[in-house]
């Protein structure tokens, strides 16, 4: 199945990783698309809210300074990872860029 035939705006597709990319830019694109899922967005929002509550503040040079906590990585581009995605015109080029690493159903 070709990627362009299945990617029409407004449809929901299931994407599965069939090959883990070696280049970081392709892995980041897959992870960015995985983060578009509503369940993952809810998790990231909840964790970010908790992170702002528990940020440690220190006095540094006479001013208050926040020791920033690193953002949570809750998804990963691993072999066999599957996710559903609602196709929008904005993400079609991203999906086409990683078409050789994923299977679109």
Image (spheres, rainbow, N blue to C red):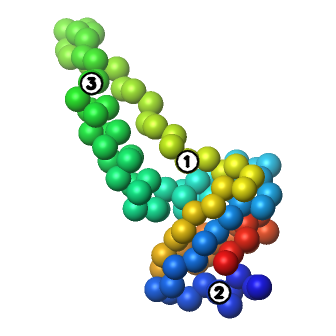
Callout 2 crowding tier (Cα within 10 Å): few <14, some 14–19, many ≥20: some
> Label 2: which residue?
6
Q: Where is residue 64 in the image (x, y as percent from the top left)?
A: 21, 17
Q: Earlier in the sequence, mark 1 or mark 3?
A: 3
Residue 102 versus residue 57 in the image, above or below = below
Q: Where is residue 88 in the image (x, y as percent from the top left)?
A: 48, 79
Q: Position of residue 18 (x, y in %)?
A: 78, 61
Left or right position of 43 against 97: left
Callout 1 crowding tier (Cα within 10 Å): few <14, some 14–19, many ≥20: some
| The C terminus, quarter of image | bottom right
Mark 1 to mark 3: distance in Å?
23 Å
Q: Residue 54 carries which label?
A: 3
> Label 1: which residue?
75
Q: Which quadrant of the structure image shows residue 60? A: top left
Callout 3 crowding tier (Cα within 10 Å): few <14, some 14–19, many ≥20: few
Left or right position of 12 against 103: left
Residue 83 versus residue 54 in the image, above or below = below
Q: Which quadrant of the structure image shows residue 58? A: top left
Q: Earlier in the sequence, mark 2 or mark 1?
A: 2
Q: Residue at x 69, y 70 (%)?
A: 97
Task: State whether residue 68 appears in this view.
Answer: yes
Mark 2 to mark 3: distance in Å?
44 Å
């Amino acid at each position: 199945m070709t990627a362009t035939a299945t990617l029409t705006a407004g449809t929901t597709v299931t994407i599965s990783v069939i090959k883990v990319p070696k280049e970081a830019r392709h892995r980041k694109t897959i992870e960015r698309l995985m983060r578009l899922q509503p369940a993952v967005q809810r998790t990231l929002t909840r964790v970010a809210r908790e992170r702002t509550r528990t940020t440690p503040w220190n006095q540094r040079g006479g001013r208050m300074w926040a020791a920033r906590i690193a953002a949570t990585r809750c998804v990963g581009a691993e072999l066999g990872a599957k996710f559903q995605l609602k196709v929008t015109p904005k993400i079609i080029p991203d999906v086409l860029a990683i078409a050789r690493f994923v299977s679109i159903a």
